[in-house]
Image: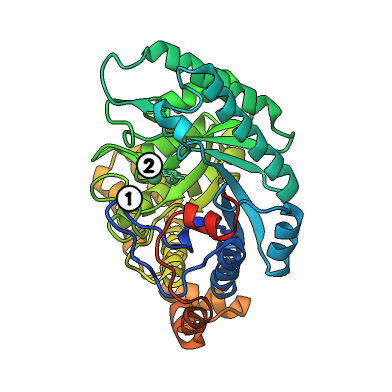
Amino acid sequence: MNADLLTALQAQRIETPSWGYGNSGTRFKTFAAPGAARDIWEKLDDAAEVQRLTGIAPGVALHIPWDEVEDYSKLKTYASARGLHIGAINPNVFQDEEYKLGSVTNPDEAVREQATAHLLDCVEVMKQTGSRDLSLWLADGTNYAGQDDLRARKRRMRAGLKTVHDALPDNARMLVEYKLFEPAFYATDLFDWGAAYSHCLAIGEKAQVLVDLGHHAQGVNIEQIVAFLLDEGRLGGFHFNARRYADDDLIVGTTNPFELFCIYAELVSGANSADDVTRRTAQNVAYMIDQSHNIEPKVEAMLQSVLNCQEAYAAALLIDRDLLREAQERGDVLAAHRVLTDAFKSDVRPLLRELRGELGLPLDPIKAHRDSGYQARVADERGTQTGGGGYPVREKAGIV
Ligand code: RM4
Ligand code: MN
Ligand code: MN
C-alpha cells in the first residue's frame, strides 16, 4: 500500500457516542437488548471493544446528565486504561420539565438562566475530562405561529450561546448543531446551517457548525454545505447516521453510501487544500456517530458504523485528484463525474484488510467480534434491562 494512503487511513478517527451502547429506541418503543450497557462504565467497556477491533475509534462522546458521575477524573482514568479518551460533551437541556417552552430561548428568564448554568457546568466537565468539544443540540422551538416572538428568541439564543462560548477554555470549542424540525414543528430556533453559521460568526472563533446527516430536508446537498463551511473555516463536527425520511438515526452508510462518499470526498479535498483556513478546519473536524440502535445488537451496530465510515473514507482517498481537476478544467462533465464514481465503485475491502494486517488488528472486525463471545458474555453479566434513554440509568444509579 502506498505510504500516504497508509498514513491517512491510520490517522482516521470516528468518535462513538455513549448513548449508542445503552438501550435507546424510537418514541414508539425501545426494545431491550440483552447485554446493553447499563451505565457509563459499561458503555466505556463496549467502546473499548469497538476500539480494540477497529483501531480508529478511541474517542467516546458523553451525554450529561445521562452519563453524570461523581468523579470525572476517575472516568477519565477508566477510559484511558482502556485505550480511550473522552470526546465531545453533549449537554441535555431538553428533558427537564422547565424546558417545555425552550432552554436558552425560553420566554422565562429564570429558565434561560437554568439552561445556561447547565451548559456552563458542562464546560467544567470538559475541563475535568480533557474534552475539547462542547457539542450543542438545542431542542428549542415553537409549535404554533404566534406562540412566541421569533426575533426575540433569536436574540436569546445568541446571548445564551455567547455566554457559554466565552467560558470555554483556550483550546476548546463549541459545536453548534442545527435541525430542520422536531421536537418543535412550527419553528426550530436553530433550523439550518445558515442559522447556526451566523450565530457562530457573531459569537466568536471557538464556535463552529456541526452537521448531522439526519437534520436536513429531503434532497438537500449536504456535501455542498460541507464544502461551504470548510471554506469559511466553520465546519467543526459531524454526526454520522443514515436517513431516508428525517432524523432516522440508522447505521451510517446503509441507506446513503454515495452521499457518505461525496461528503468524505469534500473532507479529503479540504484536508489537502492549499488554503490554510480550509486545510486546518478540515483536519480538525470532529467525526462522530450519532445513532439510535433499537433492533440491532449494540456493539455490532457500532462496529458496522465505524467500518462503513472507514470504507467511505478509503474510497474518497482513492479519487484521482489530478485527473479530476483536468476534467473539470476542460469542462468535461462526464469524465469528471466518472473520476469520482470510479473511486466510489472501487472495492476498498482488500486495502483495509492490508491496513489491519499492518496495524495488528483483526482482518475482519465483525467476524472477530462475533467469534469473541463478547456479546454472550455481556448478556450473561448484565442481563436484559427494560427501558431506554438516560433516565432509567440515572434512577438505577440513585442520582434522581
Ligand atoms: C438530536 C440530535 C442530537 C442528539 C439528540 C438526542 O436529534 O441529533 O445530536 O443529542 O437528538
Ligand atoms: Mn446529532
Ligand atoms: Mn439527530
Q: Amino acid at mark 1?
A: Glu
Asked whether 295 or 227 is in front, the reply is 295
The answer to which of marks 1 and 2 sits earlier in the sequence is 2
Dot 2: element: helix
* Residue 268 can be seen, yes or no: yes
Residue positioned 31% across, 61% down in the render: 254
Asked whether 104 or 270 is in front, the reply is 104
Q: Which residue is mark 2?
A: 223
Q: How many C-alpha atoms fall within 10 Å of the one at disc 2: few (<14), some, or many (≥20)?
A: some
Q: Amino acid at mark 2?
A: Glu
Residue positioned 59% across, 23% down in the render: 113
Across and down, in percent, residue 78 comes to: 71, 65
Quadrant, the N terminus: bottom right
Q: Is residue 274 above or below residue 83?
A: above
Q: Which residue is mark 1?
A: 259
Across and down, in percent, residue 324 comes to: 39, 48
